[in-house]
Amino acid sequence: MSNVPTAVLWDMDGTLVDTEPYWFAAEHQLVESFGNTWSEEHAHAVVGFDLLDTAAYIIEHGGVDLPPRDVVEYLLDAVITSCRQRLPWRPGARELLEELFSLGIPCALVTMSWRRFAEAVLEQLPRSSFEVTVFGDEVTHGKPHPEPYLRAASLLNVESSTCVAIEDSPTGVASAQAAGCRVIGVPNMKPLKQLDGVRIVSSLTEIDAATLWTT
């Protein structure tokens, strides 16, 4: 087996870019507009969720009287505005992405964010950054189901078992593992457990293309 993966599959929120604080702020603002309180515990509970699942949780626990899709659209509007003002990269992410491109190792973006938000991030990257993209509103089953990662591998025409997925949340790690990928976990808002097939690093500055396949 080669000492590098055939492809690298990237989560976006909290892994590639540190947008989780933007989501938290939007959730707080929405819940408070209905006269209710949104705790840090609530915000952490939905990290890595499909957006409609997040909306259902906000409606149930935040007392928000809106249809789920309206909740999602509210959050998207707020976070897109924040990202266009400033896109906060996770340490080492941009450098690793550029190195992988220079070496010809294909990358996929595998995010539970919807297309219109993800494209607001992608428009700030070189067009060649990702060969394929998988968005949360274009899959039947979101993370932790393996579908998003299996679809990315299929679109790249590679076996998922030869890919490395980079994730920050337990939900995303579970999805990538269920798809058969090796996983690099970069904890952000939630701690990650030590699991077989998962290498945990504190920052992407600790790894490069040559060490991606190291267990």
Image (cartoon, helix red, strand yellow):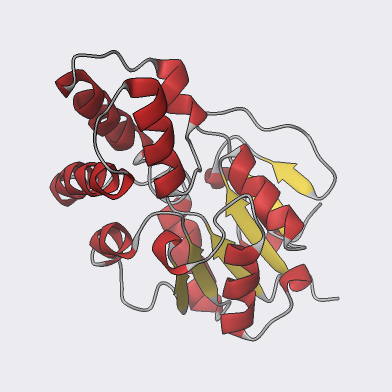
**Residue 111 showing in the rendered view:** yes
Looking at the image, is 172 positioned above or below residue 62? below
Is residue 91 visible in the rendered image? The answer is no
Quarter placement of the N terminus: bottom right
Horizontal and vertical percent position of residue 116: 26, 63
Asked if residue 27 lies left or right of residue 60, the reply is left
Residue for point 50% across, 28% down: 45
Q: Nearer the viewer, residue 56 or 84?
A: 56
Going 41% across and 17% down the picture, which residue do you hit? 40
* The one of 56 and 180 positioned closer to us in this rendering: 56
Q: Nearer the viewer, residue 209 or 37?
A: 37
Question: Camera-side residue: 63 or 100?
Answer: 63
In the rendered structure, the answer to whether residue 69 lies left or right of residue 39 reads left
Image location (x, y in percent) of residue 4: 72, 70
Q: Residue at x 29, y 50 (%)?
A: 69
Eyeballing the image, is 111 above or below 68? below
Where residue 42 sits, quadrant-wise, is top left
Left or right: residue 180 versus residue 59 is right
* Total number of numbered discs in the rendering: 0
Of all residues, the one furthest to the bottom in this rendering is 157
Residue 136 on image: x %, y %: 44, 60
- Left or right: 117, with 204 as reference point: left
The location of residue 95, given as percent across then percent down, is: 44, 57
